Each structure stands twice: as C-alpha cells, then as structure tokens.
Image (spheres, rainbow, N blue to C red):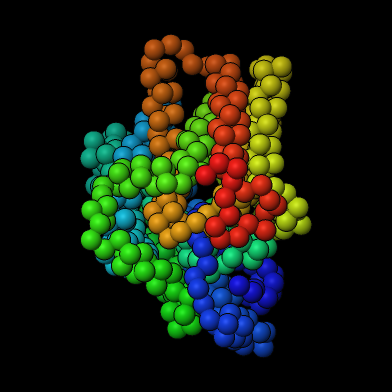
Amino acid sequence: MVLSSPFSAAGLLDIRGGAAIAAATSAASVTQKTGVFNVGLSNESLATLSMAMAMSMHFFGYEFARSATMTLLTSSRTGFKSNAALPFALAFVCPASLAMLSIYTKVLDVAGPRAALKSTAIFCSAGLSIFALVLRSLTLSTPASSPPLPITKFLVVSLFVFREAYVQLMATQHWSFMGSVLDSSSGAKWFGPIAGASSISSAVAGYAIGPLVNRFGVYGLLVLTSVSLLASLLFAEGAYTIAERHGFNPADQHKSSKSKSKGKPSSHESLISKADSLFKRVPALKWLFIETLICQGLSTVLNVTFISKLRAVLPSDADRAAWMGKFYAYANMVSGFFQFGVIPLTIHHLKPAWVWTCLPLIMISFGVGQILKFPPTLILTAGAFMTMKTIEYSVRGVVNELLYVPLDFESRYVGKEVIGMLGYRLGKSGTSLLLSAAGYACELGLKELTFVSLGMSVLWLGSARKLTEYLPDTKIGRVSPGSKGRKH
C-alpha cells in the first residue's frame, strides 16, 4: 500500500505498540487520493493520519495520569511513605492486565476491533473520572494532619494499577489498526516517525504538567486524561470510518476469521488456551513473549536502581519530582531523535536479527560499566535507565511492530494483546514480586541490583538470539506477508 511520505500533509504522527497484515483492497482504493489542505493523500494515508492523531491524544493524556498516580501513591495524605510502595503496587498490575485482556478478547470476538476500541476507550475514560471524583471527596473529608484512610490507600493503589494496565491495552489496539493499513515497506518508513511523534507528544505533556497541576490540581490531571481519551476515540472512529468506506477495514478480516472458525471448539477457548495454541502455531510469538518478559524485568530492575540512587542523592521529595520530570522529558526527546532521524535512515539496511542482538549487548555494556565503577554515579545509573527507555520507546518498539506485519489476524490482534499487554505487565509484576521478596529475605542494595541487572541483560541476549531463529533472514522493510524465518 502506498503512503505519500512519512512527513507529508498533517506532519507529525504518534503511535506506540501493535501491528497487523494489510487487508486486501482494490486497486482503486489503494491509489485514490483525498485532498487535505490541498495535499494529495491516499485513503490509507488519511486513515493512518487519523489513527495516529488518536494515539497522540492517548499518550498526551497518559503523561498526566502517570504523574498524578505517582504523586498520589507517594503522598503522605493519600498514599505510602515506604519505598516498598512502588514494587507492591506493580505486583498487582499483571492480574489486572490479565482481567482487562480477557474482557477485551471477548468483546473483540463478539463485536470486532472497532467496537472493542470504542468500548475500552469509554470504559477507561469513565474509570479515571470516577477515581478522581471519589478520591478528591475522600481527601477533602480527611483532616490534613490525619493519616490517609485505608479506603483512600486502597483506591490509590487501584488507580495506579488501572493506569498501568489500560495504557498498553489502548496502545496495542491503535497499532493493530495501523499495521492492518500498512504493508511492511510502508511500515518501515512510517513506524519510526510515528513512534517519534509519540515521544514528542509525551515530552510536551510532561513539560505542561507543572502549570496544569497548579491550576487544576492532581485530580484535575486525571480528568484531563479522561478528556484526552475521548478526543482520541473521535480520531479513531474517523480512521475506521475511512477504512470501512474504502474497503480496507480490519473488521472485515475479523469477520472472515470468524467465519472460517465457525463451528470449531477453539472459538470458545480461554485466553490462556488461545495463547498456548497461538504460540504453538507461531513459535516466533512464543519467543517474543519470553523476550518481552525478560526485557521488562530488566527495565523494572533498572528503574528501581535509578530510584534508589536518586533517593540517596536527592532526599527532598520536590527535588526528586522535578529531576524525574526532566528525566522523562529528555528520554522522550532522545527517543524522538532516533525515531525521526536515525531509524528512518537506517531501518531498511538492517536485518531483524542484527537489531534484536544489538539491543541487549548495549545494556550488558552498561552493567559491566556500573560494576567496574562502583558505586555508580547518578548520571551513570540514570544513563542506563534512559538508554533502556530509549530502546523501548524507539528501536525495539519499531522492530517489534514490523514483526507482526506478515502475520494473520489472530496473531496480530490476539497475539499482540497477549504479548504487548500480558507479557509486558507480567515481566514488571513478576520482577517486582521477586524484588519485594528478596528485600524481605535479605538486604537488597545498589550493588546487588547492579549484578541482577547485568544477569538479566545476559538472559535477554539469550532470548533475543533464540527469537532471531524464527525471523526472516532479510532486511527490514522487505518482509512480505507469509515470510518465514529459518525455523517456523
């Protein structure tokens, strides 16, 4: 399918997470142009632009929710003073993600991808607003000098877990639509700039949090996130309307998939059974799931190491909050540089195996450096974590999405949600549980965390190398539907 240019017409796009095979369309739908600001856009380009704007609004609002939930979790009026609060809350993310994913797959089976996206967007928007109203009422009814009520702490943890779970659920649905519209060649051209715009959007929102929280308060940030989700839904509906009107709607693939499986008992399989049969049928997805578990586990360890070092260097809550705000803004800007500049220029010349192997080697070098220069400085610790976030936001995110392009509908929509949501959260929650248990059993200091991160980097390299055995031995952008790896 043909796109005019990754930078044409409406400029910057924004998306993270999920891909799919292009739907069969007529030659007329592929080549037909639509005038937008006197610039010719194909229908596929226009649908892509609309869904990109949907993702832009989603991630823009998510930055407000992330700041609000972290503030409430660590506040003396609503949350916990203990350093164990973050790992404790993260431990519940995986079960919540699994529950949301199970509901999503049922809606997807019954109503299709468009209705599933609409339902989840409205549910998440309403949920955030309800949390904001209830928590604000509880806070106002509690004297400032009194400790937070148990129900307040419970709701704050629940809100944190809900925020961690919903972001990936929404993002993967947007990416799945994008991958259905784009083929591998167009995806290799567009995915980098699209993900880069996501980083820019997040950075802009991060810098806007200070003035907005002074004007609307912490709970106002949650309401702004709800509004952003509704705005995101409007753009997403526009994308599906364009696709339906011009004959490349992913819902058509869903209907075809259902008709082929009609009468088979597998249509009523549980989510776990679906994932198991999918991994057996597509081994690359099984190893991508394992690679995701280890990658997110490493990210969690580096996050805890960074927070521990930051707390030791900057004991003031206000100073830490300001430092972290700038940290994430810089991380998003660095990711944007790679996504807009480096990736589009280099992605066509690289093989997937080269990329998957290189990423863990970078983190191994950081682990060795931290051990040789112990105790590591705050800059070195922050640099390791920022590098990991840059890898997640940019390089790994793009090649991850391209991996899905040649796959069938179930592999793209169900497989993407299982890996992108369950694997992503299970890696974080499982690692958080292990870190919490280790912290109770023995002293888990900066030195131990540094060795753990190096060990997990080595495990990541092993899983990535195994994954490459199932990837096509061709350069990125030349992968076509049905391409298979050395093993399949």
Query: Can residue 105 be seen in the rendering of this structure?
Result: yes
Query: Can residue 144 be seen in the rendering of this structure?
Result: no
Left or right placement of residue 359 versus residue 140 in this view? right
Q: Which sits in the foreground, 400 or 386?
A: 400
Tell me the residue at 49%/16% (across/down).
444
Tell me the residue at 44%/29% (across/down).
431
Left or right placement of residue 343 versus residue 488 in this view? right
Q: Which sits in the foreground, 272 or 390?
A: 272
Picture coordinates of residue 334, whole percent (x, y): 69, 48
Picture coordinates of residue 448, whole percent (x, y): 55, 16
Tell me the residue at 55%/41% (across/down).
487
Q: Quadrant of residue 340?
A: bottom right
Tell me the residue at 39%/72% (across/down).
252
Left or right placement of residue 349 versus residue 171 in this view? right
211 shown above or below 431? below
Total number of numbered discs in the rendering: 0
Picture coordinates of residue 311, whole percent (x, y): 54, 27
